[in-house]
Amino acid sequence: MKLFLDTSVLLAAAGSTTGASRAVIDMGQSQHWGLLTSRYCVEELTRNLAKLNAAAPAAWKNHLHPRLTIVRDTLVHNQPLLFAKTKDRPILITALAEQCDVLLTLDQHDFGAFLNRRVYELWIRTPAGFLEHERDQGQLTLNDLRL
């Protein structure tokens, strides 16, 4: 399964060793999840990383970044896309172009209307919602979850 992590998820994972965002990244390899993000998200993360706690830059560099595949941004989609949020449109289009199964976001403002819904074949979920869904589908056990 391919997961696309937007900036909000990366920031949450860098800023805290607990929580669903960090759990998704920590569990990625053992669950055989491909963890993708884009250059756009990494640039946005870099601009905001200093606003987090003092441990966040090292967590990003040493723990999180090595577990991710960073893909090129895609700016156009070959099908109609009704998503007016210009700032986050490249995130959605890149996740679709990379044929991800799920776009993980904590951005309720821009993605709220799409949460727990599909845009074409792409599910949009929060990290916690994704983990709960996987658990409910029998893909994860309580031992897998360390939330």
Image (tube, rainbow, N blue to C red):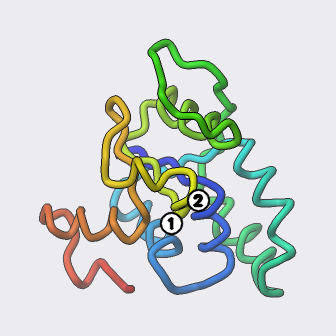
Residue with the mark numbered 2: 67
Estimate how packed mark 1 is, as few (under 14), some (14 to 19) or many (20 or more) residues with alpha carbons within 10 Å. Answer: many
Picture coordinates of residue 62 (x, y %)?
Answer: 73, 71
Which image quadrant for residue 79?
top left
Q: Is residue 22 above or below residue 96?
A: below
Query: So how many labels did they put on this image?
Result: 2
- Residue at point 33%, 66% (across, down): 129
Type of the residue with mark 2? Arg
Q: Is residue 132 above or below residue 32?
A: below
Estimate how packed mark 2 is, as few (under 14), some (14 to 19) or many (20 or more) residues with alpha carbons within 10 Å. Answer: some
21 relative position to 57: left or right: left
111 relative position to 134: left or right: right
- Residue at point 62%, 63% (across, down): 8
Picture coordinates of residue 137 (x, y %)?
Answer: 14, 61
The residue tagged with tag 1: helix, strand or loop? helix
Picture coordinates of residue 84 (x, y %)?
Answer: 58, 34
The residue tagged with tag 2: helix, strand or loop? helix
- Image quarter where the C terminus lies is bottom left
33 relative position to 98: left or right: left
- Residue at point 38%, 54% (across, down): 115
The reply to whether callout 1 and callout 2 are in contact (CB within 8 Å) is yes
Which mark identifies residue 25?
1
- Residue at point 64%, 66% (across, down): 64
Of residues 57 and 30, which is closer to you in this image?
57
Picture coordinates of residue 14 (x, y %)?
Answer: 67, 74
Of the numbered discs 1 and 2, the one sitting upstream in the chain is 1
Type of the residue with mark 1? Ile
Number of the front mark, 1 or 2 = 1
Rounded to the nearest angstrom, the CA distance separating label 1 from label 2 is: 7 Å
Query: Residue furthest toward the top?
Result: 78
Which image quadrant for residue 143?
bottom left
Q: Is residue 132 above or below residue 100?
A: below
